[in-house]
Image (cartoon, helix red, strand yellow):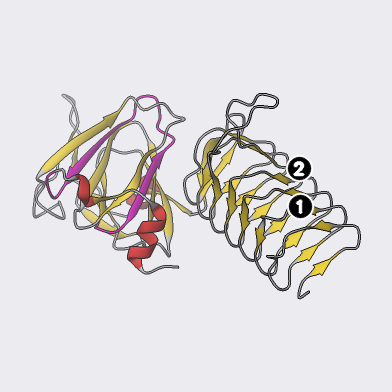
Amino acid sequence: MDYFCHPQAIVESKRIGPGTRIWAFAHILPGAVIGADCNICDHTFIENDVIIGDRVTIKSGVQLWDSITVEDDVFIGPNASFSNDPFPRSKQHLTAYPRTILHKGASIGSNATILPGIRVGRNAMVGAGSVVTHDVPPNAIVSGNPARIMGYDAGEVDVGAEAISMPTGEVGVREVGVGGVRIYRQPFVEDLRGNLSFGQAPETLPFTPQRYFLILDVPSKEVRGESAHRQLSQFIVCVRGSVHLVVDDGQHRANLILNRPDLGVYIPPMVWIVMYQFSPEAVLMVLASGRYESAEYIRDYEEFLHLRGVG
């Protein structure tokens, strides 16, 4: 064998990668597939229809049931619990179970519970004791019961604070350092009769809009966006309230806090965006460089990374 197996472990599978270590009282059924350089700790159980990638760590007290895929570099903490039947009954078995996928680099905290059919996105972090009832976006940090997004694995940028260095009442532009994303400060006119902010192309807008839409009345627990565009550009303004906007080019990410109506964010093509933590009164206005076309959207993060040429 080119892997280590403790004498007190039961390993029935013949498909174990080189360099993997399997410790005492682990039990691995014949159909399981385990990659290279994994660490399978004491008192773990791995059923038949389980696929585990390379460099995965599974701590003590974890059971992986049929129809679970664990991609490379995933960490699963002690006593994390997985299930595969959304409506279990004794002696009644499904012909096919919904597949749970832990994408590359994800981490599951100790005692977390993952419901059937969940996808935990690439590099996401699930906090200890969380109960995950919905898919977790890539790079998201979730916690609680039920688990909610608390933040993102990204540098945080308060767009309002960034604008302080821009000339008051004048347009200004700042690079974010993510795929050509830029922050625009638009003119802002204060008046006793009511304040005014505006933009016009080409002076203060990066393109001539062909369409606009509004996002409003979003519960704070919900997430919007989670997509990129192939050729279309967007300009996003939080005209009321506040919202967090994550921008991601596949290699760099930033978490922008939008909270002023005279500030807009230019999103060029092929930048992944996620919107979350909407304040109760938040209203987003999105200007688009083209008309709506469903084929313009990239809605799967793994496809987005492939198109960006990022592994």
Q: Quadrant of residue 225?
A: top left
The number of discs equals 2
Q: Residue at label 2? A: 79
Residue name at image x 67 percent, y 69 percent:
36
Using the rendered image of the protein, determine whether residue 167 is visible from the camera's viewpoint: no
Residue 223, x across and y down, in percent: 41, 36
Q: Residue at x 83, y 49 (%)?
A: 43
Callouts 1 and 2 close, C-beta under 8 Å: yes
Lateral position of residue 294 relative to residue 209, left or right: right
Magenta-highlighted residues = 268-291
Q: Earlier in the sequence, mark 1 or mark 2?
A: 1
Q: Which residue is mark 1?
A: 59
Q: Is residue 306 left or right of residue 203?
A: right
Badge 2 crowding class, 10 Å Cα cut-off, few under 14, some 14 to 19, many 20 or more, is: many
279 in magenta: yes
Farthest residue to the bottom: give it: 2
Residues 14 and 308: in front is 14
Q: Could you say where residue 193 lies in the image, as x and y percent from the top left? A: 16, 24
Name the residue type under label 2. Asn
Q: Quadrant of the C terminus?
A: bottom left
> At 91% from the left edge and 57% from the top edge, which residue is drawn?
8
Q: Amino acid at mark 1?
A: Lys
The one of 258 and 28 positioned closer to us in this rendering: 28
Work out whether 27 lies above or below 53. Answer: above
